[in-house]
């Protein structure tokens, strides 16, 4: 139908290709940032330490939590929430580091 044709045309644009690529890469970068700080401090990473831009950043964080790669915990007096990598999250982080993907 017309909608499918429209979607196909839009997806072929360089802008949409870059957006789709970033949908794969940005959550990995965010997981890396959480794991690096967690490994350095052994504490949940306060939400204000994360560089999240608008809806996209919040959605990446929710995806990591939904995938059980990160847990969301009550924050301390300086943050609403803290985030800790799960064992699976740490494993993916270390594997992606080894593969030089993040």
Image: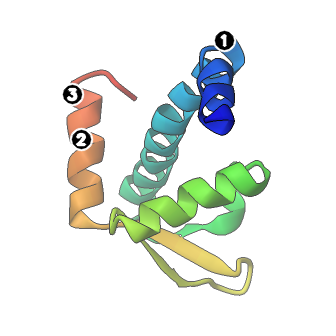
Residue under the image location 61 percent in, 58 percent down: 59
Quarter of the image for residue 60 reads bottom right
Disc 1 is placed on an element classified as helix
Residue labelled with disc 1: 14
Q: Is residue 78 above or below residue 102?
A: below
| Residue 66 screen position, x and y as percent | 42, 69
Q: Nearer the viewer, residue 92 or 62?
A: 62
Quarter of the image for residue 58 reads bottom right
| Residue 39 screen position, x and y as percent | 36, 55
Residue labelled with disc 3: 98
Q: In the displayed structure, does residue 22 sit left or right of residue 78? A: left
Can the viewer see residue 70 in this picture?
no
Q: Earlier in the sequence, mark 3 or mark 1?
A: 1
Residue labelled with disc 2: 94
Task: Quote the CA–CA distance across marks 1 and 2.
Answer: 31 Å
Q: In the displayed structure, does residue 17 sit left or right of residue 52? A: left
Q: Is residue 15 above or below residue 37?
A: above
Q: Earlier in the sequence, mark 1 or mark 2?
A: 1
């Amino acid at each position: 139908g017309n909608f499918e044709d429209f979607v196909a045309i839009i997806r072929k644009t360089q802008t949409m290709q870059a957006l789709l690529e970033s949908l794969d890469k940005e959550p990995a970068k965010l997981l890396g940032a959480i794991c690096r700080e967690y490994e350095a401090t052994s504490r949940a990473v306060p939400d204000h330490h994360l560089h999240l831009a608008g809806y996209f950043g919040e959605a990446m964080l929710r995806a990591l939590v939904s995938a059980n790669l990160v847990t969301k915990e009550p924050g301390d007096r300086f943050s609403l929430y803290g985030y800790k990598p799960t064992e699976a999250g740490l494993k993916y982080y270390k594997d992606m580091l080894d593969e030089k993907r993040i």
